[in-house]
Image (cartoon, coloured by chain):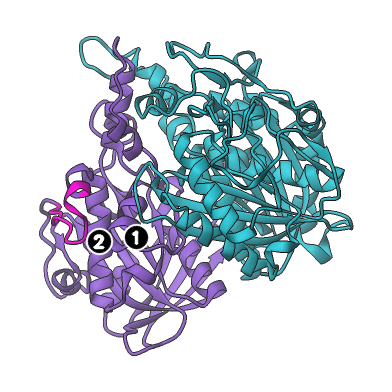
Amino acid sequence: MRVFVEGVGIVGPGLQGWTASRAILAGEEAYLPGATVVAASELLPAAERRRAPVAVRLALAAGEEAFRSAGRDAGSTATVFASSSADGDTVHHLCETLASAARDVSPTRFHNSVHNAAAGYWSIATRCMKPSTSLGCYDASFAAGLLEAVVQVRTGGVPVGLITYDQPYPEPLHSARPIATSFGAALVLAPVAGERAIAALEIEFVPSPVRATPMQDAGLEAVRLGNSAARALPLLAALAAKGGGSVAIDYLSGAHLRVAAGEC
Amino acid sequence: MQALAVSHFSIVNSLGSGAEAVLRGLRENRSGLTPCDFDAAAIDTYIGRVQGLEESPVRADLSDFDCRNNRLVQRCLEQDGFDEQVAQARNRYGAGRVGVFLGTSTSGIHTTELAYRRRDLRTGALPADFRYAETQNAFSLGEFVRRYSGLSGPAFVVSSACSSTAKVFGSAARMIAQGVCDAALVGGADSLCLTTLYGFHSLELTARGPCRPYDFERDGISVGEGAGFALIERVERAASGAALLLGVGESSDAYHMSTPHPEGLGARLSMQQALESAGLEPSDIDYINLHGTATRTNDASEDKAVVEVFGRDTPCSSTKGSTGHLLGAAGITEAIISILAIKNDFMPGSANTRQVDPALTCRYLLRGKDAGVSRVLTNSFGFGGSNCSLILGSGE
């Protein structure tokens, strides 16, 4: 299945935006690990900005950068949100409250606990009434989201924004499900090679196991392995490299995605 | 879209286990709702509880996945010979050619809620027997069903609150259209947990008594649990007579996180998209299975949207007075109820609803009735403004 990339967003540890990260991902500049810095959303109305939890702001930051660089209107574009655990902080606080005697759950926390909270805030921020799918597939959440987004682009003949993100749980859940860092990435995908297209992607679901393409830099490889959304890194590196490249992304047990990135 | 066959299905909720029990409950306009007695919940409300899950662990070889949600899933896969039909599809198409697209809102979160009550007093750690990936994570449902059914095609779990298991029909249809798989297992489950009971209570959205959709005195939802699954394949490869998936419509409200658009704008878009995708006119729909949660706001905004699209003549009802609101499992449950309506020429009524709110003007059925049903539209709307409408039709 062939689609075209119009915009890229990335928010990760020492990876502040696509423009700043391109040379690092292409191996032209050294990777320096650092904190993940999430910029405040420019789109959210003030009331929602106050209520939006960190995981949601992470997703929005990645998505906003991708749409900005694509020069495409987010308000008229369908979206796919892929995350293993969505907002773990909110889930932790709810479980803590429910284990207490009072069980006085906050209504805002409750509505933020749904897996599609980021999609909800996104649609409000961008005034987008187009379809939006929120999905999870544990460590393969990025691969699953990419497959769903590409299939939507091909079937509907429409552009789709793919936003993937994962945020560490606080303890005690962190020990049960260690997510090493905060990471978000986004791609704006289109069915035809328009003026804005920066690369073509050829994507195939392969029902056999494979060793996933690693990152060459040990620090970036640790980021890739530590967060389900960061499984996008090898594809982003292929997009950053001159001449593109082909990568294998691990998906389910016994399956993977083969993605070739090249010029349009 | 190209119509697809919904060849086989299975269903479990508080009305009963299996299609026959659920259909009988609907024909009797019966309610499966009972006073809330779940776990430690001290809330004055009714729930739709599936009996006997406490004594029914999952298959021994999948014991890592044991939790209330997966017990409910297994109970459902065992109904109506469904697991045998899935095995036949696996043999017919090959395990890697059958996709698994499922939905849930809270997956096995109840296991985590229980684990938080057993934290180590000194360190705060969760108990050593807590298994996150196999219980709490949304994909626990997906991995459990893949392993239970021996399927290895593309898979994921959609979690968009109460539209989740409606939206998986769209994912399956697209995957089949693109040739990523030849058939798909769709559906999912949501099970009782304190998160949703206390969460909806905090929003003042739980009804005191059994929920009363579209009633003048409606005061909120009854949280229920349930599961449903369906096997979807190309019409030419399915047995003749199977029900058809004719259309899928999806939209976003872009309005509020937990309140529907007051004019039902997103709901209207979703229904119009479904009609467009099916190539049908509003007059082609014989019956509408409403989202009808029995909150003041949902029923009012959905009614506006339905009347705007369909006028006031199309018979409608919500079956949530019978089942409760199955949240992430509402979509598949009501899709299967729609198929039962088609196969049995029966339009369900609305258990517990006494007097339809005069402000709501769609043609609301208080009692079920026997009438020809060829095409049904069913609505599922969720938090975050996630909307999905499905159109199902007769394959006769």
The chain identifier of the residue carrying mark 2 reads: A
Q: Within 10 angstroms of label 1, few (less than 14), some, or many (20 or more) residues?
A: many
In the image, residue A37 lies in the stretch drawn in magenta: yes
Q: Which residue in the protein does label 2 denote?
A: A62
Q: Is mark 1 on a helix, strand or loop?
A: strand
Q: Where is residue A103 in the image (x, y as percent from the top left)?
A: 31, 16
For the N terminus of chain B, the image quarter is bottom right
Q: Which of B101 and B21 is in front in this view?
A: B21
- Numbered circle sitting on residue A163: 1
Residue B113 occupies which quadrant of the picture? top left
The picture's colour for chain A is: purple
The chain identifier of the residue carrying mark 1 reads: A
Q: Residue at x 40, y 24 (%)?
A: B201
The part of the chain drawn in magenta is A36-48
Amino acid, disc 1: Ile
Q: Within 10 angstroms of label 2, few (less than 14), some, or many (20 or more) residues?
A: many
**Colour cyan belongs to chain:** B
Query: With respect to residue B117, does A66 lie above or below?
Result: below
Q: What element carries label 2?
A: helix
* Residue A131 in view in this figure: yes
Q: Residue at x 62, y 25 (%)?
A: B58
